[in-house]
Image (cartoon, rainbow, N blue to C red):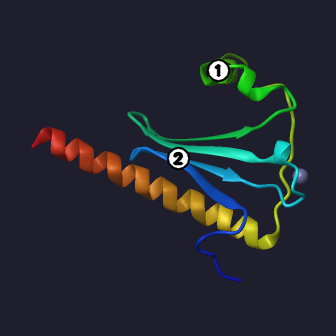
Amino acid sequence: MNVQIPAEGVMKTNEWGDSKVYRIACACGDESHNHNVWIEAEDTGIVVTVYTTTQTNFWSKARWYHIWTLLTKGYIDTESSVHLTKQQALNYAETLKNAIIDVEDFRKNNEQNKNS
Ligand SMILES: [Zn+2]
């Protein structure tokens, strides 16, 4: 089984060069199971964050709130599962891998331009 492009169950929702955002759709079709995946190149390296929607009204709180909760508590106290077909899981993995390479490259190129 090969990775698909464009990929079943994987949607790019945003991109800013040094960060990319994807939505991974649950195979059951329930949008509250979706993963929102942020791949970001930070000073400290690559940061990959997986958010799930709803169940706690995720978007009623700002993103920094959840990051703060994660930093101080180490977890966000809700649970949600995403169900993937084999094809989707492969696509998910490949998307993460490529996005990490992309944002890392972008950042490296930016650094070089700054220094030259
Ligand atoms: Zn589901």
Left or right relative to 30: residue 105: left
| Alpha-carbon span between mark 1 and mark 2 | 17 Å
The kind of residue on which mark 1 rests is Ala
Residue under the image location 78 percent in, 47 percent down: 34
Label 1 lies in ligand 1 vicinity (Cβ under 8 Å): no
Mark 1 or mark 2: which comes first in sequence? 2
| Residue at the extreme left of the image, as rendered | 116
Residue under the image location 34 percent in, 50 percent down: 106
The kind of residue on which mark 2 rests is Asn
Q: Which residue is mark 1?
A: 62
| Residue at the extreme bottom of the image, as rendered | 1
**Nearer-the-camera pick, 62 or 82:** 62
Disc 1 element: loop
Q: Which residue is mark 2?
A: 14
- Category of crowding for the residue at label 2, using alpha-carbon neighbours closer than 10 angstroms: few (below 14), some (14–19), many (at least 20): few
In percent of width and height, residue 2 lies at 65, 81
Q: Is residue 39 above or below residue 6?
A: above
The reply to whether residue 75 is in sight is: no
In percent of width and height, residue 54 lies at 82, 33
Q: Is residue 51 above or below residue 1?
A: above
In percent of width and height, residue 70 lies at 68, 24
Q: Is residue 62 above or below residue 39?
A: above
- Category of crowding for the residue at label 1, using alpha-carbon neighbours closer than 10 angstroms: few (below 14), some (14–19), many (at least 20): few
Q: Is residue 71 above or below residue 16?
A: above
Disc 2 element: strand
Residue under the image location 64 percent in, 20 percent down: 62
Q: Quadrant of residue 28?
A: bottom right
